[in-house]
């Protein structure tokens, strides 16, 4: 299957089902040894590209899939940082952070990328831990794979 469709590239639209499929497919590739220190190997991207397009009858490009994985990694990093911050909790029933308004206001002033996560549910949070744990620069805020998502 070619990496790009022959016509114009259509903007990718991701839903929860596609995100979960993507996270699981990328995790499978990592477990199969298709991730190096610098990122996923080309063969991993090709395999996930073929699988997701077949599963959802889409014509996504490999670049669109890479962009979505980067978005998910950014989401993981943001959630992980909040989990480490004083005054934050996690509601496992709704998969959202729990924080008092005053703590939240101070936090988002210092971390503006977190603003969308005040009430945003992240039902695949544990899966993000499995996929990204220990993969970003410092590792200072990494969650252990045997730790539940922020609690």
Image: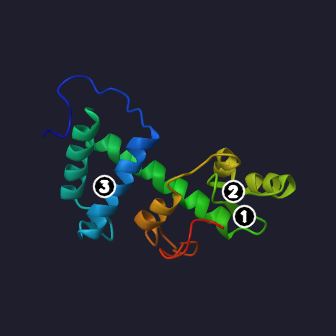
Image quarter (top left, top right, bottom left or bottom right) of the N terminus: top left
Residue on which disc 3 sits: 25
Given residues 87 and 37, the one toward you in this image is: 87
- Left or right, 73 with respect to 61, comes to right
In the image, what residue occupies the spot 54% across and 72% down?
Answer: 143
Residue situated furthest top in the rendering: 7
Give the CA distance from mark 2 to mark 3: 26 Å
x and y percent of residue 93 in the render? 64, 55
Give the CA distance from mark 1 to mark 3: 29 Å
Q: Mark 2 or mark 3: which comes first in sequence?
A: 3
x and y percent of residue 41 in the render? 23, 61
Given residues 144 and 108, the one toward you in this image is: 144
Residue situated furthest left in the rendering: 1
Residue on which disc 1 sits: 89
The answer to whether 126 is drawn above or below residue 62 in the figure is below
Q: Mark 2 or mark 1: which comes first in sequence?
A: 1
Given residues 93 and 143, the one toward you in this image is: 93
- The quadrant holding residue 11 is top left
In the image, what residue occupies the spot 63% across and 64% down?
Answer: 81
Give the CA distance from mark 2 to mark 1: 6 Å
Residue on which disc 2 sits: 97
């Amino acid at each position: 299957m070619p990496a790009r469709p022959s016509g114009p590239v259509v903007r990718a639209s991701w839903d929860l089902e596609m995100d979960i499929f993507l996270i699981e497919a990328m995790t499978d590739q990592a477990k199969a040894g298709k991730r190096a220190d610098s990122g996923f190997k080309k063969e991993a991207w090709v395999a996930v590209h073929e699988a997701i397009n077949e599963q959802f009858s889409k014509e996504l490009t490999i670049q669109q899939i890479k962009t979505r994985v980067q978005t998910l990694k950014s989401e993981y990093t943001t959630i992980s940082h909040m989990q480490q911050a004083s005054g934050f909790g996690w509601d496992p029933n709704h998969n959202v952070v729990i924080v008092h308004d005053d703590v939240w206001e101070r936090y988002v002033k210092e971390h503006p990328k977190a603003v969308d996560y005040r009430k945003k549910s992240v039902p695949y949070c544990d899966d993000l831990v499995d996929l990204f744990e220990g993969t970003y620069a410092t590792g200072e805020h990494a969650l252990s794979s045997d730790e539940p998502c922020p609690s």
